[in-house]
Image (spheres, rainbow, N blue to C red):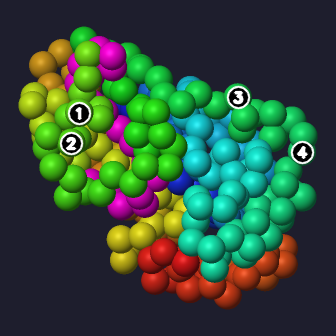
């Protein structure tokens, strides 16, 4: 069985459509999305529509929560709070009430069958916190405490998003995986990022994939749709760094 894992699309439909075409060529059996579908990009509704058509399951992210209720003081630095809520207003203005209801319904976490006795535990950031930052250099002890607990039924793989940095680590007979970001990579590589897990009777293999998408078209979407503070976001997309 082949399972694709996407995360952190952030309203960037050009990148998402490119990744979905790539997955079609790979004969993926199921697609699981780890959240942050719409907020912080020019085409939030298109991204929600594509994911609802394509994904077997979707986990809710912190940006999905922000789209529903706004960005609150203390969740981001004070000097960016107004700007981020202006971007959130753009998102809400470009999606429907049913989209807000959908985003508000997304679960915090879930466990999935990968076939051949393998299981995947998936969340956006941490099992009980959509905002927790868990970096690739987090200690083995802390990673295991977060993602490999008895409550999560000792998964073969645990996957989370949120940090926009892809990586894979082996840990205590399991695998910890972050697929990176489709729409806003933060690792210096502007290519869209995702992961594929392939299981067979005797093996399980997880891999990170990078896809070049038409950045020019994505930047044109920011201009065409008059996205607020688009210069800062465009720089983030070009440099693959935090805005």
Separation (CA) of disc 3 from disc 1 = 27 Å
Q: Which residue is mark 1?
A: 145
Label 3: element kind: helix
N-term-proximal mark, 4 vs 2: 4
Which residue is at a point 43% across and 60% down the rendered structure image?
164
Q: Which residue is mark 2?
A: 142
Separation (CA) of disc 4 from disc 1 = 39 Å
Q: Nearer the viewer, mark 4 or mark 2?
A: 2
Label 4: element kind: loop
User: Which of the pair 22/51 is nearer the observer?
Assistant: 51
Estimate the x, y position of residue 69 in percent, counting from the top left: 77, 47
Q: Nearer the viewer, mark 4 or mark 1?
A: 1
Q: Which residues are magenta?
A: 151-167
Q: Which corner quadrant holds the C terminus?
A: bottom right
Q: Residues within 10 Å of mark 3 (few under 14, many from 20)?
A: some
Q: Are marks 1 and 2 in contact (CB under 8 Å)?
A: yes
User: Which of the pair 215/239 is nearer the observer?
Assistant: 239
Q: Which mark is residue 105?
A: 3
Above or below for 201 versus 242: above
N-term-proximal mark, 3 vs 2: 3
Estimate the x, y position of residue 141 in percent, counting from the top left: 14, 40
Above or below for 99 versus 114: below
Separation (CA) of disc 4 from disc 3 = 15 Å
Q: Which mark is residue 96?
A: 4
């Amino acid at each position: 069985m082949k399972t694709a894992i996407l995360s952190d699309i952030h309203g960037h439909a050009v990148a998402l459509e490119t990744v979905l075409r790539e997955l079609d060529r790979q004969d993926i059996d199921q697609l699981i999305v780890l959240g942050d579908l719409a907020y912080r990009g020019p085409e939030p509704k298109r991204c929600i529509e594509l994911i609802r058509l394509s994904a077997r399951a979707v986990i809710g992210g912190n940006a999905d929560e922000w789209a529903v209720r706004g960005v609150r003081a203390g969740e981001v630095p004070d000097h960016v709070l107004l700007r981020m809520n202006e971007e959130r207003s753009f998102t809400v203005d470009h999606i429907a009430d049913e989209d807000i209801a959908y985003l508000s319904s997304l679960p915090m976490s879930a466990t999935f069958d990968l076939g051949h006795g393998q299981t995947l535990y998936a969340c956006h950031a941490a099992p009980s916190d959509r905002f927790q930052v868990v970096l690739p250099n987090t200690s083995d002890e802390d990673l295991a405490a977060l993602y490999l607990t008895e409550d999560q039924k000792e998964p073969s793989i645990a996957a989370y998003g949120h940090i926009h940095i892809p990586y894979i680590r082996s840990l205590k007979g399991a695998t910890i995986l972050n697929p990176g970001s489709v729409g806003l990579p933060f690792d210096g590589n502007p290519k869209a990022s995702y992961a594929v897990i392939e299981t067979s009777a005797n093996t399980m293999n997880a891999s990170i994939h990078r896809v070049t998408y038409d950045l020019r078209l994505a930047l044109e979407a920011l201009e065409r749709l008059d996205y607020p503070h688009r210069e800062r976001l465009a720089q983030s997309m070009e440099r693959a760094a935090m805005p």
